[in-house]
Image: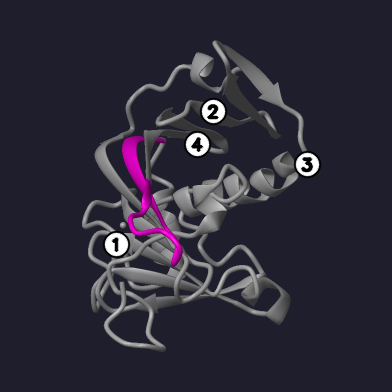
Amino acid sequence: MGGEGEGKFPEKVKMNKIFCSPIKLMAIMLLSTSLLGWGDSWDQIKKTANTITSVQAEFTQKKHLEILARPMVSKGKFYFRAPRSLRWEYTSPLRSVLLMHGGTVTRYVKNDEQIIKDSSARLQSMQVIIQEIALWMKGTFDANPAFKPSLMPGRKIVLTPRDKAMADIIQRIDLQLSATPGVIQSVVIYESRTSYTVLDFTRVTLNAAVPDSLFKEL
C-alpha cells in the first residue's frame, strides 16, 4: 500500500510525499475489467459513490526513500463525512491531526505535551491535498484538471500529471479500489522511481454516524 528492474515502478507501492509528510499525504476504492460494485464509467462511479454518506478507517503509511534501509512507518485513523468533512489523524509515532470542515482546513501538531495549531506555509499545500481526497471519496476522480485519470484493469485508477511542473513533483498516483463500493483499498503516490509512499486502509466502516465533534477545532 520495490521494483523488478530499472525503469519500472514497483508494483506493490502506494503513495508518495504528498501523503507522507504532513504536506503530502492521503486516500481509497475498486475495478477489474468492469468496475465491480462501482461501474465501468466515471458517471457510474460517481452515482455509486453518492450512496456513501461516511467512511471511517485505520491506515498504515509507509514512506520509501532510496537513502533509507527501511521505510518510515506511521499509523492513524481517517474519517470522511459527505459532502466535504474530513479528519486525517496520525496516532504514531507522532500525533498530528488535519481537519477539513465548513470550507476550511486546519492542522494540529503535538508540541511537548500540548496540541497546537500549525500556522505554517505548509497548510496551503495540505489544503490542496485534503480537498483532493474529499473529491475521491465522492467518486469524482476526474475533477482535478491537473491529472488525467484512467480506468485500468485490476481494480485500479491511475492519475497522471498533465503538465511537466506537476510531473516534477508527482509522477503518478495509483488508487487501488476494493470490491466494496466506497472503499479505497490503497493509495500510492510516486514522486520518483525510488521515492514513494504507500497507504493501506483497514477496518473500514461505511455510512455510520460521524459526530460533528470529530471535525471541530481541538
Whether residue 55 is in magenta: the answer is yes
Label 3 to label 4: alpha-carbon separation: 27 Å
Q: Which residues are magenta?
A: 54-72
- Could you say whether the residue bearing mark 3 is in a helix, strand or loop? loop
Residue that carries the numbered disc 1 in the rendered image: 30
Amino acid on which the number 4 mark rests in the picture: Ala
Camera-side mark, 2 or 4: 2
- Could you say whether the residue bearing mark 1 is in a helix, strand or loop? loop
Secondary structure, magenta segment, majority class: strand
Whether residue 16 is in magenta: the answer is no
Name which residue lies at 69% across and 81% down: 164
Residue 91 versus residue 177 in the image, above or below: above
Camera-side mark, 4 or 1: 1
The disc label shown at residue 61, or none: none
Amino acid on which the number 2 mark rests in the picture: Val
Name which residue lies at 34% across and 41% down: 59
The disc label shown at residue 97, or none: 2
The disc label shown at residue 121, or none: 3
Where is the N terminus found, in terms of image quarters? Answer: bottom left
Camera-side mark, 3 or 1: 3
